[in-house]
Amino acid sequence: MDTQGNDMKTVLITGTSSGIGLATAVAAARAGMRVIATMRDTGKAGPLRHAAAAAGVADRVEVLRLDVVDPASVSSCVAEAIDRHGRLDAVVNNAGAGRVGTIEIGGTDEVRSTMEVNFFGVVEVTRATLPQLRASRGRLITVTSVGGVVGQPFNEAYCAAKFAVEGFMESLAPVVATFGVDVTVVEPGAVASEFVTSAVPDLPALVNTAGPYAPALQAYVDRTRKSFGTAQTADEAAASIIEALTAEKPAFRIQTSDWARGFVGTKLTDLDGSAVQSLTDAWVR
């Protein structure tokens, strides 16, 4: 996606109040793009505005409200972006929420709410922006996760949603390619951000209410804490999204680190599933 000259490209990014979304908004502006930075609560835009100002790109970052689970909010935001700039050249589906737990304890309502944010939110934003992306022969980039390829213990709802997103985008990609629209899924591994805190705000309470699953959950929690001790930064993950935005022809699937490539690679070469099961079994023992 050419961002040179007077034809400044416009990219809409969801979930920009923190983490990967914030880092991507600033990085895209630094790469010469006009950024429509969206978030559910614009009262939380302070860190983004500060980071954009520090990077010298505050004039390229506009904050709009968008709640991915509210179709009216999505439509209103997209309409306002088009009214202001006349076009969208790229969309980054980044908004999402983690969920740690297991079905017997958490119940189906937790699964439904997780799917609503992580899957149906992506579907709604995609549906609303595709007319503009078709017109601009633009790019549709979605942040999934290594959990969209490899199912992980106590992440049943989250991984189910991310699996669904990957299947949706893999199916959509050849359809919209007939209009010149490129589709990419970006798969981070562990990233040091507020996402982890939002997924499990009170780990001790979660373990205490896990009943017979408590020992396995505690083992998972201990292992996860160690993995996030070596997590990549949000800026490092955002670099892969910028790669997808600026490459002459972006790949459909991009991992954000060597660890993520190795982890996803285990699944993609594991025809009978034994390698993945052997790997994740160790996480809960």
Image (tube, rainbow, N blue to C red):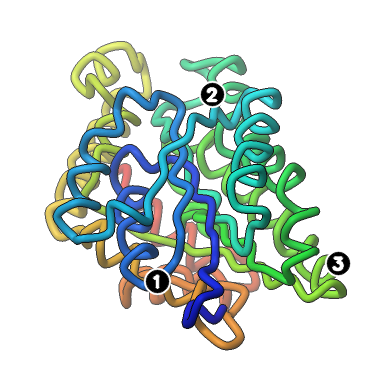
Image x and y of residue 67, in percent:
54, 27
Q: Is residue 123 visible?
A: yes
Quarter holding residue 210: top left
Q: Residue at x 44, y 34 (%)?
A: 39
Q: Residue 32 carries which label?
A: 1
Q: Which of marks 3 and 1 is in front?
A: 1
Q: Residue at x 30, y 55 (%)?
A: 23
Horizontal arrangement in the rendering, residue 30 relative to residue 8 (left or right): left
Q: Which of 158 and 134 is in front in this view?
A: 134
The kind of secondary structure element at disc 3 is helix
Quarter holding residue 62: top left
Q: Which residue is drawn at 44% across and 77% down?
A: 243
Q: Residue flagged by tag 2: what amino acid is it?
A: Ile
Q: Which of 267 and 187 is in front in this view?
A: 187
Q: Identify whether 283 is placed above or below 4.
A: above
The kind of secondary structure element at disc 1 is loop
Horizontal arrangement in the rendering, residue 43 relative to residue 171 (left or right): left
Structural crowding at the residue carrying mark 2, measured as other residues with C-alpha within 10 Å and reported as few (<14), some (14–19) or many (≥20): some
Q: Earlier in the sequence, mark 3 or mark 2?
A: 2
Q: Is residue 151 visible?
A: no
Structural crowding at the residue carrying mark 3, measured as other residues with C-alpha within 10 Å and reported as few (<14), some (14–19) or many (≥20): few
Q: Residue flagged by tag 3: what amino acid is it?
A: Val
Q: Which of marks 2 and 1 is in front?
A: 1
Q: Which of marks 2 and 1 is nearer the N terminus?
A: 1
Separation (CA) of disc 3 from disc 1:
29 Å
Residue identified by numbered label 2: 103
Q: Identify whether 137 is placed above or below 40.
A: below
Q: Residue 175 carries which label?
A: 3
